[in-house]
Image: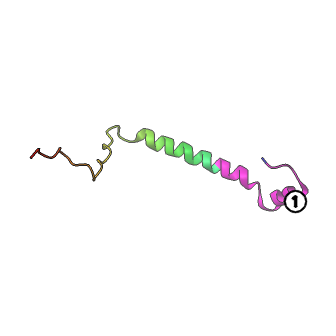
Amino acid sequence: MFQQTPVYDRLVAERGDIPVQVRGEADRIHRDLAQVLHQAPSSRPSAPQNVFEPKAPPAAR
């Protein structure tokens, strides 16, 4: 991702490789979320209707 430079090498030595740590956490969260979604009940509520649309067409006058 980053071109290796003395400054980057020094930062990695002092603080750790933050991009690698972030990718690892993102992967872990992704796996956890996939597991939770897989366990969720299959009967999901339907999407809410648009509140601006009438429920029934108006009666002709």
Name above or below for residue 9 compared with residue 46.
Answer: below
Q: Residue at label 1?
A: 7
Mark 1 belongs to which amino acid?
Answer: Val
Q: Position of residue 45 (x, y in %)?
A: 30, 44
What colour scheme does the image use?
A: rainbow
Q: Position of residue 44 (x, y in %)?
A: 33, 41
**Residue at the extreme left of the image, as rendered:** 61
Tell me if residue 29 is in the magenta stretch: no
Q: Main secondary structure of the magenta part?
A: helix
Between 36 and 58, the one nearer to me in the picture: 58
At a point 11% along the width and 45% down the height, the residue shown is 59
Mark 1, residues whose alpha carbon is within 10 Å: few (<14), some, or many (≥20)? few
Q: Secondary structure at mark 1?
A: helix
Q: Position of residue 33 (x, y in %)?
A: 50, 45
Between 47 and 21, the one nearer to me in the picture: 47
In the shown orientation, is residue 46 left or right of residue 55? right
At a point 89% along the width and 54% down the height, the residue shown is 5
Q: Position of residue 50 (x, y in %)?
A: 30, 49
**Residue at the extreme front of the image, as rendered:** 61
In the shown orientation, is residue 37 left or right of residue 56? right
Range shown magenta: 2-24
In terms of image quadrants, where is residue 56?
Answer: top left
